[in-house]
Image (spheres, rainbow, N blue to C red):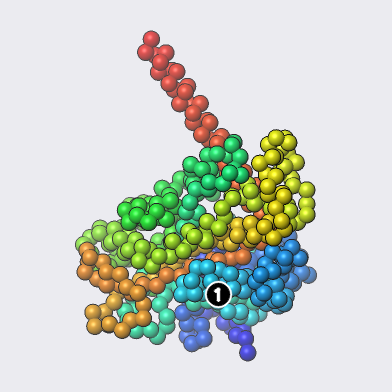
Amino acid sequence: MALTLKEEDAADWVYRGEGAVNLVLAYAGSSLSFIGKVVRIRKAPRNGSQSKSVSVRNSIALTPHERVLWKDVHQLISSSDKEIVGQLYVQHVMKPLLGSNSVDAGMHVLVTREFLELVEKNVSGQRPAWRVEAARVDAHCDFGLLMSDHSLFAYGSQGSSLCLTVEIKPKCGFLPLSRFISEVNAIKRRITRFEMHQTLKLLQGEISQLSEYNPLDLFSGSKERILKAIKSLLTTPQNNFRVFLNGSLILGGLGGVAKNTDVCIAKAFEDELKSIIRADDDLCTNNLSTLVTEALQKSGVLDKLLKVQKLDNIDVEGVIHAYYNITSQQCMVCKELSEEQAKIYTPLHSASLDESLRIVKDYLIATTAKDCSLMLCFRPRDEEDSGSVYDNVYLDSTEQSFDYKVYFIDLDLKRLSKVEDYYELDKKIVNCYRQIIKMDQGRNEETGLKASNAAY
């Protein structure tokens, strides 16, 4: 019989964080069925765009075009409305690509309306205000996704009770080289999507300062550059970096963009780390950076993730044309181009349906990989504990050995209908960055002219 969360269970679930679509709760009660678990529950926009009369389960079933797109994944297209398509996607698409040891597809759990309404009331004070304004817990959704809490080691496993977890949202780790990138957008081949998007977020007021993080450093394979990336994330975590001690957040934000790590935050964080990293004052944070770097290199998870990200080998500027082939619509991109400009996309529009399906499917899988997060969980290994089932890394500077595990989370199915949105967002990000560069160049030229005139 399926597990069911009822009204009386709500008090045992505490706010852990949230994204655009789901809210995450961690279990704080004593039931053996839920110890060491988190549950993801769906949110609904407050603008009322989702009708109360529409079944949430029906709303997440595959559309006719998506059933064609995923025709090779029998488990997806044969699922009934009552099954969670997103969970099946993780199990049968992402897990084989990223490795079964690093992916947890979770399990379906039933939730009552009373449970959801009480959860909404209990966590509202902990959610970022802008998240509360944008969406509420969807009380019409009668299921959640129960998963292991990857900020902890398995309940009852041997080893230290102390546990330190680092959550990283790496983003895209390569520069696109596609020949379908228009000349006006050639800057995409030189500047990371992450850096350009930061500029747009700054102008829109989503962040107060540009991040120091560069995804190319993290995915470089170089120990020095990976270490640099981790230190940059520690300084400007935004929504790309969080740290938990025994499941409790000690750095980063809950459900939103964290403020930059100032002196006070850095001192408090350093003090928290002293309970698990044996280092002199002010060196615990540096040792954490080294520990994370060592684990990332030893595990090889970044190489696996980058390989999946690179399934997007023609960029959204090419993918959009394959999308219109699949949906049998007039290409709205070519419609805006001259005949000469549109010639470059002729091979895409001449491609077979199977080839168009492959292009779009690979792009959507890659988009999942560009938007997921990594959880790296550490605990000190006792000297006498030689039978641990976990991999380990050794921290030379503190002479400590740590068990560690790495999991991918937030491997969400990207909907076919979102391809047009992804194309428009890409255009918006690049246009914004180009405008800023042009303005900066204009100011520099003006300053240079004034300096030259002053010299005379």
438, 5: nearer the viewer: 438
Q: Residue at coordinates 76% horizontally, 69% vertically from top-left?
A: 54
Q: Position of residue 224 (x, y in %)?
A: 31, 53
Q: Position of residue 352 (x, y in %)?
A: 71, 56
Which amino acid type is marked by label 1?
A: Ala
Q: Residue at coordinates 59% horizontally, 62% vertically from top-left?
A: 365
Task: Please name the residue that numbered disc 1 is placed on.
Answer: 105
Query: In the image, is residue 319 above or below residue 142?
Result: above
412, 318: nearer the viewer: 318
Q: Is residue 127 left or right of residue 259?
A: right
Q: Position of residue 140 (x, y in %)?
A: 70, 72
Q: Is residue 327 visible?
A: yes
Query: In the image, is residue 102 above or below residue 180?
Result: below
Q: Is residue 189 left or right of residue 301?
A: right
How packed mark 1 is, by other alpha carbons closer than 10 Å (few <14, some 14-19, many 20 or more), is many
Q: Residue at coordinates 61% horizontally, 70% vertically from top-left?
A: 89
